[in-house]
Image (tube, rainbow, N blue to C red):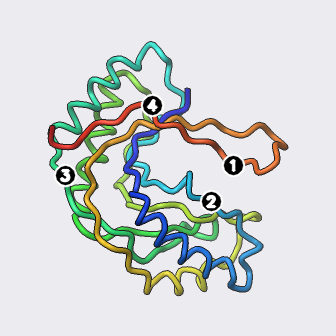
Amino acid sequence: MRLFAAVLPPPAAIDELAGEVDRLRALPGADALRWTGRPGWHFTLAFMGEVDERLLPELRERLARAAHRTPSFPLRLHGGGRFAHRALWAGAAGALDDLRLLAERADAAARRAGVAMEDHRRYTPHLTLARSRSGDADLRPFVDELQHFEGARWQVAELHLVRSNLAARGEPGGAPRYETVGSWVLGE
């Protein structure tokens, strides 16, 4: 199964972001992007890819420890950016060092459980909003609009293990479906 560890913003934060995304989707050039939907709005902490089900018990145990060792912390959706001409994202503000620490711990938990992880990179907190259909869209106007976006503060209280069910090729609405398969309260 295809898995990742994530922080899921609360419904109120998702509602705020949805209002901003509605504005962005009205901008010229928005049709050159594939927009993600509310079910896909999350902060991926550690992408694990395909994980053998035999590793799940130890992975769950190690993620529980990572959550236990990390106290709850404040965060808010804030601003945004892009990865070259490929992806547009919303950013975060608040206790980013704590978010990065949780990402490091989730990554380490997966590695220690035997999950073959990609090469380690510095964590960039982002929530993907859209991807370029062609790979060369001009995302700058969207990033400029996102600069002023300030979401309300909320408390990150849980670490989630999420399964990504990819859509079949040619399936209408071809977006992945996400299913939370484990959650652990931070600091407990």
Q: Position of residue 36 (x, y in %)?
A: 62, 59
Q: Position of residue 76 (x, y in %)?
A: 33, 68
Q: CA distance from mark 1 to mark 2?
A: 8 Å
* Residue 167 numbered tag: none
- Indicate the secondary structure of the residue bearing disc 4: strand
Whichever of labels 3 and 4 marks the residue nearer the N terminus, that label is: 3
In the depicted structure, whether residue 140 falls above or below residue 162: below
Q: Quadrant of the N terminus?
A: top right
- Indicate the secondary structure of the residue bearing disc 1: loop
Q: Looking at the image, do the residues carrying marks 3 and 1 touch, with CB atoms under 8 Å apart?
A: no
- Indicate the secondary structure of the residue bearing disc 2: loop
Whichever of labels 1 and 2 marks the residue nearer the N terminus, that label is: 2
Q: Quadrant of residue 63?
A: top left
Give the residue number, with chain letter if any, for mark 2. 36
Q: Residue furthest right?
A: 170
Whichever of labels 4 and 2 marks the residue nearer the N terminus, that label is: 2
Q: CA distance from mark 1 to mark 4?
A: 19 Å
Under mark 1, the amino acid is Ala
Q: Position of residue 56 (x, y in %)?
A: 40, 20
Instruction: Tell me the residue at 59%/82% (across/down).
Output: 140
Give the residue number, with chain letter if any, for mark 3. 72
Instruction: Determine whether, in the image, residue 172 is placed left or right of residue 128.
Output: right
Q: CA distance from mark 3 to mark 4?
A: 20 Å
Give the residue number, with chain letter if any, for mark 1. 175
Instruction: Tell me the residue at 57%/65% (across/down).
Output: 129
Instruction: Tell me the residue at 30%/71% (across/down).
Output: 93
Give the residue number, with chain letter if any, for mark 4. 181
Q: Looking at the image, do the residues carrying marks 3 and 4 touch, with CB atoms under 8 Å apart?
A: no
